[in-house]
């Protein structure tokens, strides 16, 4: 009996285990192949890069757990970037700017949530429209030109360090921990799995399904906002095209992490392993001077392999 | 042993799921033109054996022989092609498709041979023919979307679909579990007809009466073992129960000796346009109120509106004398008005999640402080409710979808009990549940009544309703047609004539 249980448990952790193994493999192989790889400078670099995709992927996990998708996150990054750029140029206090950016992103989240949860739009279509609108807003607002950011405190969000750790990495960690706790240790988090697995049954069990759906889009938009702040601070400018295509990398990380696009099944630890793996891999390929065109091919194949392993281990049907 | 007449033989089939043996040298034989009933407790392995025959699951060992030749199906389409079709226990219609599209899924008639343009007209008219042949044309139209059908209608569509393949062997996994007597009779007529065409039928059911009515032979599985096969004529209830559970069971229904107290729930003039109207009801603590009616009478609909799942146009709800408002199922749960849905797959359970999460879902308040979950407590509580319902499982962390149908039903009840109901609405509580577990559930109902809970029971199995209820309301066409208050005057005949009366008046 016990043995069987262990086997079952083993089956369910197998894909997670495989991801960890791949991550360790990359680290092992790379520390042989490249003398630069294991240096603290490179590691800092990797994690600073990961933080951008990672934060968006964490927010995206909530949406995908519902079986939905949020394509608008990249555009929200762009809007946040130009709003920050403009307001900071006018000399507004950095903290007020962050709050305004947060408010703006929440408007986008509520907009998506209203379309999907209350007006029954399909998530793909709704957020595709928001993506287009958002990018348009960013371009119109800035007239297509970048703003220059000089505020030193604001810039620290993207460029600063606490001790030896870059601030973006600290923010990433904080976002991961907070979201992990919400998803796994609160009743609210449990509702995401239930609604994603069977919306009707969840509703009959008293779950306010529309509110849950709405909050997923808000969480996703807030994560995009945080990335917008970090990115603008890091490049010291408000760019209308900032965040272009970020939604796809985030979705890739979530998929590699084993969260089902049909909703109901998945985990944040999976997503975390997913974006760490993508980050390590692209850094490794850069160090090995692999052409970026080939890097894309590798990334695509990786998604297929990871999702395949995951499906195999879950679909114990035969 | 060797009998060349068998159209189908499953020999010495073994199957394990992640190390747990589910079938242990089980087998079955089918003669042409016979109805072979397959019985056994929940989780005995009946559905699994059928899925192996259909090629949905692969067997670990054993063989399947059709007309004397060993066959190996890679999937259900192979089996269909070879002449075996199956009505599954868990229905899986495609909600956005019409009835006709569902029936002809995968073999759509083409406008021009070889080109992928579906001939909608031809499909619709063939469907209409089928519906007419099986006397279902009144209730079901070929162009209806599947998502607008209730569970009995969906079941009829599945039956018609399976029959329409003109297979030589037809497997029916609990086809009547969501049908009322009237539709069941239609099914039995279909079965008679198929029998005369020499079709071999495997018929899985937990309902003794119908097994005795229609089957020629009965095979019994217990814990994945083949226990035996008997001629129906020479079998008795008691003998079969012994074969199934391996012990004696008390027969009949337990008496509800609970003290009837104050009125707990009162409904006044509940209306929902086109679904039900002027629905009034009151139920007292300790009372078991039966709701009878044909499928489509609006019983489940009223109850789902009561708990806030479906919209309610007007009406008043009084709980313990106080008027309450219910706009969302969460309001009903807060007021301890709990429904255990008949439709476990659509409304009762979240497949893909564990038994623990499912049982706890509407009871998270009990296992959390300020929204933070206390997981050890959750596990402990859910385990005790699962044990109380005798759910057959390896662990509470198992996916609810891997439980057998009857055990899923028990999980729905476990979840409802955990919500500490004042009013418990049990919609087909014994749907798909085996004889042993049925009496467990009846006893639990009496226990609950004794604790002062008011129970509203919907059941299409009249003997069960008559046996358990203290009072019966008969519904038809969304209206209450009558009330039977004296247990002595309960009879199938009375209930049915009230239920049919409504239909006759209407048309
Ligand atoms: N896909 C699966 N994965 C793991 N275990 C399974 C799976 N399918 C069935 N089982 C297990 O196999 C056993 C037999 O299940 P099966 O569905 O065949 O029972 P059954 O006789 O049809 O019961 P019921 O009368 O309740 O429908 C059960 O204990 C069930 O938990
Ligand atoms: Mg079954």
Image (spheres, coloured by chain):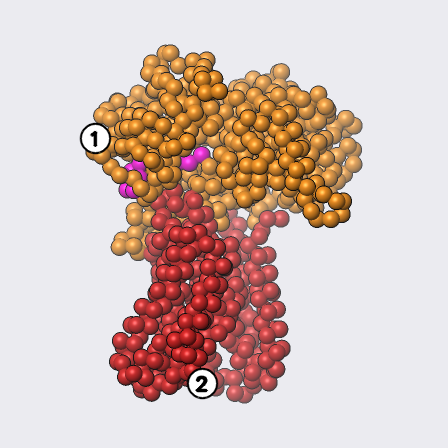
Chain colours: A red, B orange
As for residue B339 lying within the magenta part, the answer is yes
Magenta region: B331-342
Q: Is residue A317 left or right of residue A234?
A: right
Circle nearer the viewer, 2 or 1: 1
Q: Count neighbours of disc 2 (C-alpha within 10 A) and say few if under 14, some if 14 to 19, many if 20 or more.
A: few
Residue B295 placement (x, y as % from top left): 48, 27
Vertical order, A314 against A94 (above or below):
above
Which residue lies at the image location 59% right of the left edge and 74% below the top edge?
A: A296
Residue B382 placement (x, y as % from top left): 37, 44
Vertical order, A193 against A80 (above or below):
above
Vertical order, A192 against B434 (above or below):
below
Which residue lies at the image location 52% right of the left edge and 87% below the top edge?
A: A36
Residue B467 visible in image: no
Choose top left, top right, bottom left or bottom right for residue B54.
top right
Look at mark 2 in the image and give the residue it sits on: A40
Which residue lies at the image location 59% right of the left edge and 69% below the top edge?
A: A300
Task: Pick the residue in front: A88 or A27.
Answer: A88
Label 1 SS: loop
The circle drawn on residue B321 is 1
Residue A115 visible in image: yes
Task: Pick the residue in front: A157 or B16.
Answer: A157
Residue B357 placement (x, y as % from top left): 41, 48
Choose top left, top right, bottom left or bottom right for residue B184.
top right
Q: How many marks?
A: 2
Choose top left, top right, bottom left or bottom right for residue B250.
top left
Which residue lies at the image location 44% right of the left edge and 79% below the top edge?
A: A144
Q: Which chain contains the residue that carries disc 2?
A: A
């Amino acid at each position: 009996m016990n043995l069987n249980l262990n086997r079952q448990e083993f089956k369910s952790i197998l894909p997670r285990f495989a991801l960890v193994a791949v991550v360790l493999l990359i680290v092992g192989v790379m520390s042989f192949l490249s003398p630069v790889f294991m240096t603290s400078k490179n590691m800092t670099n990797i994690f600073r890069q990961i933080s951008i995709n990672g934060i968006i992927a964490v927010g995206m996990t909530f949406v995908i757990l519902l079986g939905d998708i949020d394509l608008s996150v990249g555009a929200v990054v762009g809007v946040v970037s130009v709003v920050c750029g403009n307001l900071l140029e006018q000399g507004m206090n950095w903290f007020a700017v962050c709050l305004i950016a947060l408010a703006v992103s929440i408007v986008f989240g509520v907009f998506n949530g209203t379309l999907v949860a209350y007006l029954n739009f399909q998530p793909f279509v709704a957020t595709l429209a928001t993506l287009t609108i958002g990018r348009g807003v960013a371009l119109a607002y800035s007239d297509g030109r970048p703003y220059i950011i000089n505020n030193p405190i604001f810039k620290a969000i993207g460029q600063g360090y606490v001790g030896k750790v870059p601030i973006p990495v600290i923010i990433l960690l904080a976002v991961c921990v907070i979201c992990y706790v919400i998803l796994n240790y609160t009743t609210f988090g449990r509702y995401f799995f239930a609604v994603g697995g069977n919306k009707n049954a969840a509703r009959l069990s008293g779950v306010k399904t529309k509110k849950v759906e709405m909050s997923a889009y808000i969480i996703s938009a807030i994560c995009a906002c945080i990335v917008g702040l970090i990115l603008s601070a890091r490049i010291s400018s408000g760019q209308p095209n900032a965040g272009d295509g970020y939604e796809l990398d985030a979705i890739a990380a979530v998929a590699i992490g084993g969260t089902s696009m049909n909703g109901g099944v998945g985990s944040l630890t999976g997503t975390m392993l997913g974006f760490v793996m993508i980050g390590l891999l692209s850094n490794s390929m850069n160090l090995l001077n692999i052409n970026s065109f080939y890097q894309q091919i590798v990334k695509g194949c990786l998604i297929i392999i990871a999702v395949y392993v995951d499906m195999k281990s879950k679909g114990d049907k035969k | 042993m060797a009998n060349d007449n068998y159209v189908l033989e499953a020999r010495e089939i073994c199957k394990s799921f992640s190390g747990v043996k589910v079938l242990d040298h089980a087998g079955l034989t089918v003669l042409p033109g016979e109805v072979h009933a397959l019985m056994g407790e929940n989780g005995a392995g009946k559905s699994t054996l059928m899925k192996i025959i259909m090629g949905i699951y692969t067997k670990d060992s054993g063989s399947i022989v059709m007309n004397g030749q060993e066959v190996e199906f890679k999937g259900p389409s192979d089996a269909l092609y070879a002449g075996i079709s199956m009505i599954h226990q868990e229905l899986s219609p495609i909600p956005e498709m019409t009835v006709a599209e569902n029936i002809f899924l995968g073999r759509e008639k083409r406008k021009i041979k070889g080109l992928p343009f579906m001939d909608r007209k031809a499909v619709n008219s063939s469907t209409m023919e089928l519906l007419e042949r099986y006397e279902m044309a009144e209730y079901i139209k070929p162009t209806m979307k599947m998502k607008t059908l209730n569970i009995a209608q969906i079941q009829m569509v599945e039956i018609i679909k399976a029959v329409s393949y003109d297979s030589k062997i037809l497997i029916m996994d609990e086809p009547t579990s969501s049908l009322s007597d009237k539709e069941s009779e239609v099914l039995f007529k279909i079965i008679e007809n198929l029998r005369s065409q020499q079709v071999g039928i495997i018929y899985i059911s937990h309902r003794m009466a119908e097994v005795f009515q229609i089957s020629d032979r009965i095979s019994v599985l217990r814990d994945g073992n083949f226990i035996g096969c008997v001629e129906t004529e020479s079998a008795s209830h008691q003998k079969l129960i012994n074969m199934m559970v391996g012990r004696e069971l008390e027969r009949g229904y337990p008496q509800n000796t609970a003290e009837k107290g104050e009125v707990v729930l009162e409904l006044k003039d509940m209306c929902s346009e086109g679904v039900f109207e002027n629905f009034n009801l009151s139920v007292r603590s300790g009372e078991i109120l039966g709701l009878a009616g044909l499928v489509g009478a609006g019983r489940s609909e009223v109850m789902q509106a009561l708990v806030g799942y479906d919209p309610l146009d007007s009406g008043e709800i009084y709980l313990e004398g106080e008027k309450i408002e219910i706009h969302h199922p969460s309001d009903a749960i807060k007021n301890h008005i709990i429904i255990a849905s008949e439709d476990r797959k659509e409304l009762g359970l979240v497949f893909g999640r564990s038994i623990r999460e499912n049982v706890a879902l509407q009871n998270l308040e009990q296992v959390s402080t300020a929204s933070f979950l206390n997981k050890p407590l959750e596990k402990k509580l859910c385990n005790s409710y699962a044990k109380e319902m005798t759910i057959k499982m390896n662990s509470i962390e198992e996916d609810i979808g891997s439980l057998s149908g009857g055990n899923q039903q028990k999980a729905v009840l476990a979840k409802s009990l955990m919500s500490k109901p004042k009013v418990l609405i049990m919609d087909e509580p014994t749907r798909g549940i085996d004889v042993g577990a049925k009496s467990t559930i009846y006893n639990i109902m009496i226990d609950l009544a004794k604790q002062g809970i008011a129970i509203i029971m919907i059941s299409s199995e009249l003997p069960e309703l008559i046996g358990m209820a203290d009072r019966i309301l008969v519904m038809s066409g969304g209206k209450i047609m009558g009330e039977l208050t004296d247990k002595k005057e309960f009879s199938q005949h009375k209930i049915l004539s009230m239920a049919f009366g409504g239909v006759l008046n209407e048309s």
